[in-house]
Amino acid sequence: MEEEAKVVKINQWDLGFTMFFSVLFANLLTVVIVFLYINHQAELELEELNKVTSIMQQKMLHEAETNKKNSIIKQRLYAIEKDKQQNAQRIRNETCEFWVQQVQVENTERNRLMKQRACN
């Protein structure tokens, strides 16, 4: 018997459509894979950003507490200093008045000198 040659006829349209859909499917698959990869990387970056934000918030709260404590201390020191100044002024006024009264009672050189020193 003669060997019959099998001839395979390939339809050009079928081949074209097959290649078109193969390339289209490969491109779509690539787009999906790239999208999933980028989404995964974005989630990792978001987690890192949340960690950094949390750390920064803790630092800011600590600094705010420290600043509040420092402010309270400064206010107390200011109040103490103000009281000291008021007491010193009150003592100066009382001393001046004392010497004014002494001069009225006994008008001596010493009393006038002490009044002058106390009232200046």
Image (cartoon, rainbow, N blue to C red):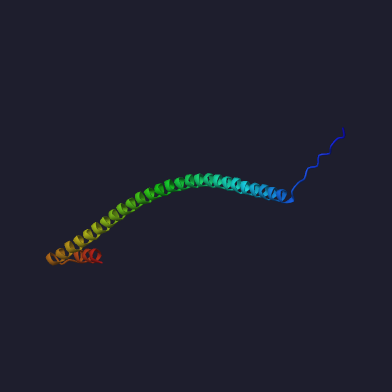
Residue 4 is drawn in which quadrant?
top right
Residue farthest left in this picture: 105
- Report the front residue among 67 and 29: 29
- Picture layout, residue 102 above or below residue 58: below
Residue farthest top in this picture: 1
* Residue drawn at (30%, 52%) of the image: 76
Please state the horizontal and vertical placement of residue 87, each as a whole percent of the image. 23, 57
- Picture layout, residue 88 above or below residue 59: below
Judge from the rendering whether residue 100 lies leftward or rightward of residue 52; answer left or right.
left
Residue 117 is drawn in which quadrant?
bottom left
Residue farthest right in this picture: 2
Residue 86 is drawn in which quadrant?
bottom left
Please give the count of numbered marks on the rendered protein.
Answer: 0
Please state the horizontal and vertical placement of residue 10, each as a whole percent of the image. 76, 46
Please state the horizontal and vertical placement of residue 25, each as a whole percent of the image. 64, 47
Which quarter of the rendered picture does the N terminus lie within? top right
- Report the front residue among 11 and 102: 11
- Report the front residue among 21 and 59: 21
- Picture layout, residue 115 above or below residue 68: below
* Residue drawn at (31%, 54%) of the image: 75
Please state the horizontal and vertical placement of residue 53, each as a whole percent of the image. 46, 48
Judge from the rendering whether residue 106 lies leftward or rightward of residue 67; answer left or right.
left
* Residue drawn at (45%, 46%) of the image: 54
Which quarter of the rendered picture does the C terminus lie within? bottom left
- Report the front residue among 49 and 114: 49
Judge from the rendering whether residue 80 lies leftward or rightward of residue 36; answer left or right.
left
* Residue drawn at (36%, 50%) of the image: 70
